[in-house]
Amino acid sequence: MGPLDDQVVRADSLTAGPDGLEIAVWSHWYRALPLPSLARVDLTVDGRRIDPAELSVTVNGTRRPLSEVAGAGDEYWFTTDPLVLHTPVETAPGREHRVQLLLGLSIPYILTGPDRVPLVAPSATDKTLTAAGART
Amino acid sequence: MTDTAPGLPRLGTTLFSLTLEQRRAGGDLAGLVREVAARDLGPGLEMVAFQSLRGWPRLSPEQEREVRGVLDSSGLTPSCLAINNDLGLYPGRLLSDDESYEYVAVQLRGAAALGFPVARVGVETGPAILERLLPLAEQLGVKVGVEIHAPLTIEAAPVAALKELFTRLDTPWLGFVPDMSASMRAVPDAVDDAHRVAGIAPELTALTKQLWAEPGPTMAKFPELERRAAEAGATPPQVGNLKMLFTMHGRMAPERWADFFPHVVHVHGKFYGIVEGPDGLTDPSIDWPAVARVLREQGYDGVVSSEYEAHAYSDRYSAFDQIRAQHDMLKRLLEAEPAVAAR
């Protein structure tokens, strides 16, 4: 809840990549977080729920399956860098897509409840945007 | 620089205030520091390491030189580096005490290398780790301060444990960083903007503000807030947002900050908006005259870092203008009476 939520997915976030729609995502948290903080990526494109197992992520120049991000605790997602979600959604430059994303970031220094579990800070996006050509 | 008279608290800015500005063009570290200096919002300069320093906590020698260059050429004085103890770094487990110590120690060395005299940690860094950090802090010449942020108050058990530790060790190298979020007199109006965007009815916001302002410990009011908000039609996520206001804004009496002395190593001048009142600049949600009185009575001559946080709720205001207004207000309040040396 706040101004950064509106910047998670921006007007120019969508790109028609070589293997599907790519979505650039910015963090709604004020500080860089370790990559395993990417706790929840609930993505629906054009009404189709994308299985997280089908997603891969590029951050700091490295692409890895979303499932492997949890093991990258020595890397951080910097405040002003986008993270790119690679989806299997077919697209082309100029095509419009409705993107619904619930991003849940695990905040490693805010522990909640008697079991001291990290707070998960959610941010919900629902935007219809146009895909640009691949950035080469 | 907003210089205050000798012997009084010094003013400054934390780059955390500029969280939204950081995401805009020209918002890199050098650009923000330059702007803070150009607008005379020093002399103190604080930042959140993980927010402002790409590569933290392992800066390359080249990155380190670059950051030092930015700080040196600004004419500002490094006041405090906010560091984090990411106990929940790995999914499914918390860091062990050894891992936690190392995680903070690396950052303490980093703070020293960049020339910061104080490193701020959160209350998740408990007495055992702090005591273990003491020799390193002393060796590096960096004080470690635990931030007292809402919902913590002087009565909270972790705060009592810290007070006991600092009293027992009787060292200048460990202490508190009071944050004014813990001692507010009203929920800030900027909240209204965020609630409007989130589709929360104004009646629900008003109800939450009203319950917040009633006497009694805030934590005891959660059940009534949940019940009445649900009755008024709030969805579960909206109830979560309303409860967040109780967590982010504490109601400790500002006079209680005196109880944290003499163990105060830095102060967060947290605020959510300065407005023009009938008697000049004023802060509707924080009683700065009372806070300034405590700081003066305690003889505090460290830095009060302006920490504008309404950016969490609204992008309607310029953080730079808000800090300017807070500095002008604080300078007037701090210089209003002759200094009293209590220690």
Image (tube, coloured by chain):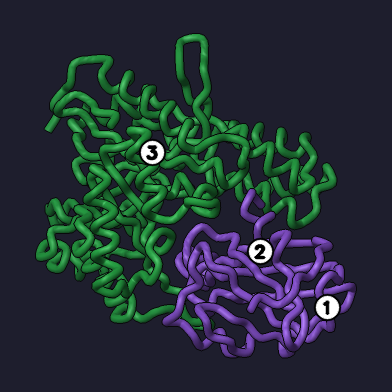
Q: CA distance from mark 3 to mark 1?
A: 48 Å
For residue B233, side relative to residue B283 (left or right): right
Q: Amino acid at mark 2?
A: Pro
- Tell me the residue at 29%/24% (across/down): B293
Q: Tell me if mark 1 has few (under 14), some (14-19) or many (20+) residues whose alpha carbon lies within 10 angstroms of its own.
A: some
- Tell me the residue at 51%/88% (across/down): A71
Q: Which residue is mark 2?
A: A122
Q: Could you say which disc has been placed on residue B306 in the image? A: 3
Q: Amino acid at mark 1?
A: Ala
Q: Tell me if mark 2 has few (under 14), some (14-19) or many (20+) residues whose alpha carbon lies within 10 angstroms of its own.
A: some
Q: Are marks 3 and 1 in contact (CB under 8 Å)?
A: no
Q: Where's residue B297, x and y in %?
A: 22, 26
Q: Are marks 1 and 2 in contact (CB under 8 Å)?
A: no
Q: Is residue B163 above or below residue A123?
A: above
Q: Where's residue B64, x and y in %?
A: 26, 66
The chain containing the residue under callout 3 comes to: B
Q: Where's residue B32, x and y in %?
A: 41, 48
Q: Amino acid at mark 3?
A: Ser
Q: Could you say which disc has been placed on residue A92 in the image? A: 1
In front: label 3 or label 2: 3
In front: label 3 or label 1: 1
In front: label 1 or label 2: 1
Q: Is residue B108 above or below residue B24?
A: below
Q: CA distance from mark 3 to mark 2?
A: 28 Å
Q: Which chain is purple?
A: A
Write down the quadrant of residue A10 in the picture.
bottom right
Q: Which secondary structure lies at badge 3?
A: strand
For residue A40, side relative to residue B220 (left or right): right
